[in-house]
Amino acid sequence: MPVSRIRALFVAAVAMGVLTGCDQSGSTPPATSGAAPASTPANLGTNTPAATGGDTPAGTTLTSGEPGEAAPVHGDTILVGHFASMTGKEATFGQSTDNGIRLALKEINDQGGLNGKKLEVITYDDKGDSKEAGTAVTRLITSDHVVAVLGEVASSLSLAGGSVCEQYGVPMISPSSTNPSVTRGKEMVFRVCFIDPFQAAAISQFITDNLKLTKAAILYDQTQAYSKGLRDDFTKAFTAAGGTVVADQAYSGGDADFSAQLTTIKAASPEIIFVPGYYTEGGNIAIQARKLGITVPLIGGDGWDSSQLGAIGGAAIEGSYYSNHSAPDQPNMTEFVSKYRAAYDGQTPDALGGLGYDAMMVLFDAMKRAPSLSGKDLAQAIAQTKDFHGVTGNITIDKDHNAQKGVVIVQMTNGKPVFAAAVDPSAKK
Ligand code: PHE
């Protein structure tokens, strides 16, 4: 049976939810064998049965380390790994990023790939869980033999996956993890986005200079490195700018009841509430705040960026703000937004679509410059990325393996994020 046919059957089985323990070698747990989302259109090479009738289409997703499906079968293609929350509470993070990566992948392969060799991306679902993330990356490296890894979105998961990449000497590019510790001290880990001290300074500046408010409350997720870091960085920046944090409350990701914290916050009479967490809790917190009669705006960080924020928060989230890497209605995003819409049933990309696209393109650019695809050579080429024109801005990898890019603030308007301001805290100093 041709390999493509085996894969088609396998994916069909996954899609029907009947295959749970596919790895007969027993060396890797089956939990990480996530398939690409069923919504990925066939023209981007999803590994749907329809797309795998004959020749393997460009950009096909390998969905599992089936026995015999590791590197040898794919001697003619270059494998790249992606670990992502394709399901779970942060599912849009993984899905949007994967969409962006596959858009870039298609363009790369349509233009001939790397010296005639096609690239393939293998995506494993980590379900938004850091243990699963570590397992997924281990599997990508030791069983699929990928040359590089893309991911994650959530900083905690990038920390988990990054340690594995570091251990095996395989380069990793996070499209969107903003906590400084993700790349700190790591030789193999890079990102194509800004970091949280900068993001926090931008949020603080927007509150004090644009909204002219000085009293903020904070409600953060104590289980997420990203949220804790952003809360610390914001507190420093806001206090330094003359603002006061009138209440500082915590929750744990997955919580559903925020009424105790919100009651304390209400009593402190803030003019705005900063909620540096992810979108599911962001939307629910907005609903519960309004129920308690809190009318001041909420402001989130990039972790709010999801098509689900408006869907969950509804009227309660209207008028609130969050910081982000890009806004779909920015003039410089027009071209990418229309490309993405054409590929994905008219969906408007969130920032993660563009960041996933940029991460893939930065990796490919480095592959072209690297003397070989060994981990060491590839990492060095990524480190030398300079003034790369990404859809989310120009990308130069600095000595700390980070990119310096602009922060935008969006405002939720009719359920969608609308550009409100571009904020550059570095211009102020
Ligand atoms: N910056 C967030 C983190 O580090 C992830 C994120 C980025 C989420 C962009 C949404 C959009 O955890």
Image: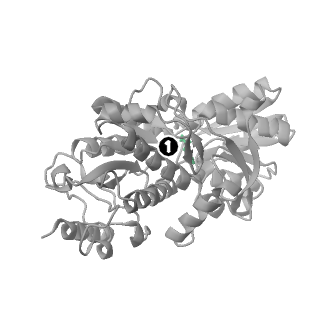
In the displayed structure, 244 sits above or below 312; it is above
Q: Name the foreground residue: 16 vs 407.
A: 407
- Which SS class for mark 1? loop
Residue at left 41%, top 52%? Answer: 127
In the image: residue 340, left or right of residue 116: right
Residue at left 36%, top 32%? Answer: 163
In the image: residue 266, left or right of residue 161: right
Look at the image and tell me in which quarter the N terminus lies. bottom left
- Colouring scheme applied when the structure was drawn: one colour
Kind of residue sitting beneath label 1: Ala
In the image: residue 125, left or right of residue 387: left
Image quarter of residue 217: top right
Look at the image and tell me in which quarter the C terminus lies. top right
Residue at the outermost front position:
115
- Residue 285's spot in the image, x, y percent? 66, 50
Residue at left 58%, top 47%? Answer: 278
Residue at left 31%, top 67%? Answer: 57
Q: Is residue 186 visible?
A: yes
In the image: residue 365, left or right of residue 286: left
Residue at the outermost right position:
212
- Residue 19's spot in the image, x, y percent? 24, 64
Q: Is mark 1 within 8 Å of ligand 1?
A: yes
In the displayed structure, 242 sits above or below 260; it is above
Image quarter of residue 111: bottom left
Q: Where does ligand 1 appear, by image quarter?
A: top right
- Residue 275's spot in the image, x, y percent? 67, 43
Circle 1 sits on which residue? 154
Q: Name the foreground residue: 53 vs 165.
A: 53
In the displayed structure, 4 sits above or below 66; it is below
Q: Residues within 10 Å of mark 1 (few under 14, many from 20)?
A: many
Q: Is residue 344 visible?
A: no
Q: Name the foreground residue: 194 vs 380.
A: 380
